[in-house]
């Protein structure tokens, strides 16, 4: 298994500002994933972050809006840039770990409210 | 990528067995079937995973028919604390990161 620490756990931000969310894993992992979950909805994959390469973004998400860093095998950040109220959501960091790497483990999420 | 279909919601009572079925008609040969549980204000948590036939662990059983086009998560004797959203994911190590709509299970006293 993997233990994931994500911070901040919540934040209230002003429109037009940016927030960087940090994700720390207790073991080295190749792939880290960032999700967004809007109220009452399922999880939507934003991007996949591999150490040493550019993140791969899903359709509808762009690097200018959601830049991601992956400086090493245990850490990643997601920045939500130039925020608007539509960015209010829960952002979750995830890694794949375990025998055969088939299981996803999640942080507790960052609840973001944009005013 | 195998698309999954689950019931949007289900209700049950404490002590009953709950079965949640997931359809995945275009599952690929290398795909595993994985179920996750999510409580409010928490990230999803792994419950069980299988490839074919039946898998059982301390919290649930997973039934997969021979054609693997569907799977059923079985929760024995549910309690109020099992109220959560349950997600079925289908994929291999390269493409199993996308979540479907999930099933919102409500357990009543």
Image: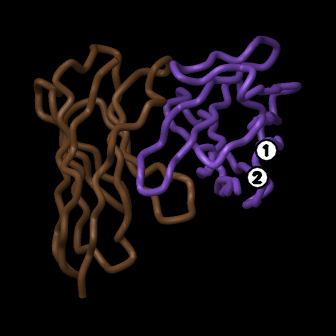
Q: Residues within 10 Å of mark 2 (few under 14, many from 20)?
A: some
- Residue A5's disc is 2
Tell me which corner region of the image, top left, top right, bottom left or bottom right, holds residue B100: top left
Q: Which residue is under mark 1?
A: A21
User: Callout 1: residue from which chain?
Assistant: A
| Residue in the picture at 72% in, 29% down | A66
- Residue B19's disc is none
In x, y percent, where is residue B38?
A: 45, 57
Instruction: Give the color of chain B as drawn.
Output: brown
- Label 2: which secondary element: strand
Between B80 and B31, the one lying in front of the other is: B80
Q: Identify the image quadrant of the N terminus of chain B.
A: top left
Give the CA separation, mark 1 to mark 2: 11 Å
Q: Specify whether A58 is left or right of A77.
A: left
Between B95 and A57, the one lying in front of the other is: A57
In the rendered image, is residue A24 in sight? no
> As drawn, which residue projects farthest toward the right?
A71
In x, y percent, where is residue A14?
A: 79, 53
Tell me which corner region of the image, top left, top right, bottom left or bottom right, holds residue A81: top right
User: Callout 2: residue from which chain?
Assistant: A
Instruction: Give the color of chain A as drawn.
Output: purple
Residue A50 versus residue A101 in the image, above or below: above
- Label 1: which secondary element: strand
Q: Identify the image quadrant of the C terminus of chain B.
A: bottom left
Q: Specify whether B88 is left or right of A51.
A: left
In x, y percent, where is residue B3?
A: 28, 26
In the rendered image, is residue A19 in sight? yes
């Amino acid at each position: 298994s993997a233990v994931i620490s994500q911070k901040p756990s919540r934040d209230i931000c002003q429109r037009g500002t940016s927030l960087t969310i940090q994700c720390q894993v207790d073991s080295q992992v190749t792939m880290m994933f960032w999700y967004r979950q809007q109220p009452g909805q399922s999880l939507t994959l934003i991007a996949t972050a591999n150490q040493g390469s550019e993140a791969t973004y899903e359709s509808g998400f762009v690097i200018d809006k959601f830049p991601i860093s992956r400086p090493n095998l245990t850490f990643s950040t997601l920045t939500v840039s130039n925020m608007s109220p539509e960015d209010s959501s829960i952002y979750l960091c995830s890694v794949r770990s375990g025998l055969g790497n088939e299981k996803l483990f999640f942080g507790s999420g960052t609840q973001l409210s944009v005013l | 990528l195998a698309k999954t279909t689950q019931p949007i919601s289900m209700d049950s009572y404490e002590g009953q067995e709950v079965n949640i079925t997931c359809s995945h008609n275009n599952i690929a040969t290398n795909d595993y079937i994985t179920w996750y549980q999510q409580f409010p204000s928490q990230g999803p948590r792994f419950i069980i995973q299988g490839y074919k036939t039946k898998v059982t662990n301390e919290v649930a059983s997973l039934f997969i028919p021979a054609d693997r086009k569907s799977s059923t998560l079985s929760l024995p004797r549910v309690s109020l604390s099992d109220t959560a959203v349950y997600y079925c994911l289908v994929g291999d190590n390269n493409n199993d990161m996308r979540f479907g709509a999930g099933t919102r299970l409500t357990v009543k006293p």
